[in-house]
Image (cartoon, grey):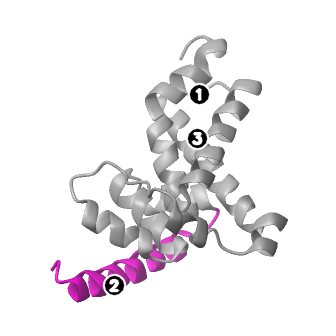
Amino acid sequence: MDNDNNTALYAFRKYGDTVLRAAYACCGSYAEAEDITQDVFLLLHAKPKSFNDDEHLKAWLLRVTINKCKNLRRSFRISRTGSLEAEEASSASYEMKTEDSSVLAQIQQLPKKYASVIYLYYYEGYNTREIADMQGKSENTVSSLLRRGREKLRLELEKEGAL
């Protein structure tokens, strides 16, 4: 990570999958997640930054990813053309590599505001304060989203007979 010319390449090799999974958790579309991932690393390549350590780099990447997902949701194209769910249903579904894909599948079915917070907390290991900073929300809001998301997830898992 010492050489600015290689920062984007280093970051992509180390955190490319993490950024892709976070983008997918936030936007729910594999195609959009790939585009967002590409944009994040192109931004880092075009405007290299210096980071204190790998955790600082990872936090920056995830923050930019979340912001790009928010921008996508607000974009004219998405707001005017509707959901990509119909397109997603006809194309191959993206599955993240985890030990329990059924739980992850249920997380992905949650509303995006819950899915992204649960993903960052449980899969990326961030605490509520860090998630709040990344998403531009208060720590209490993130805690509430986690609590409500867990409850919705628990109900869905019980319904599926997974609990």
Q: Is residue 156 above or below residue 36?
A: below
Q: Would residue 79 be visible to someone looking at this image? A: yes
Residue drawn where x is 34% and y is 72% of the image = 106
Q: Which tag is nearer the camera, tag 1 or tag 3?
A: 3
Neighbour tally class for label 3: few under 14, some 14-19, many 20 plus, Cα within 10 Å: many
Give amino acid for label 3. Leu
Q: Residue furthest right?
A: 76
Residue at point 26%, 66% (across, down): 102
- The residue labelled by disc 1 is 51
Q: Quadrant of the C terminus?
A: bottom left
Mark pair 2, 1: CA separation: 37 Å
At label 1, which amino acid type do we have? Phe
Tag 2 residue:
151
**Residue 111: mark:** none
Image mark for residue 61: 3
Q: The magenta stretch spans which residues? A: 136-163
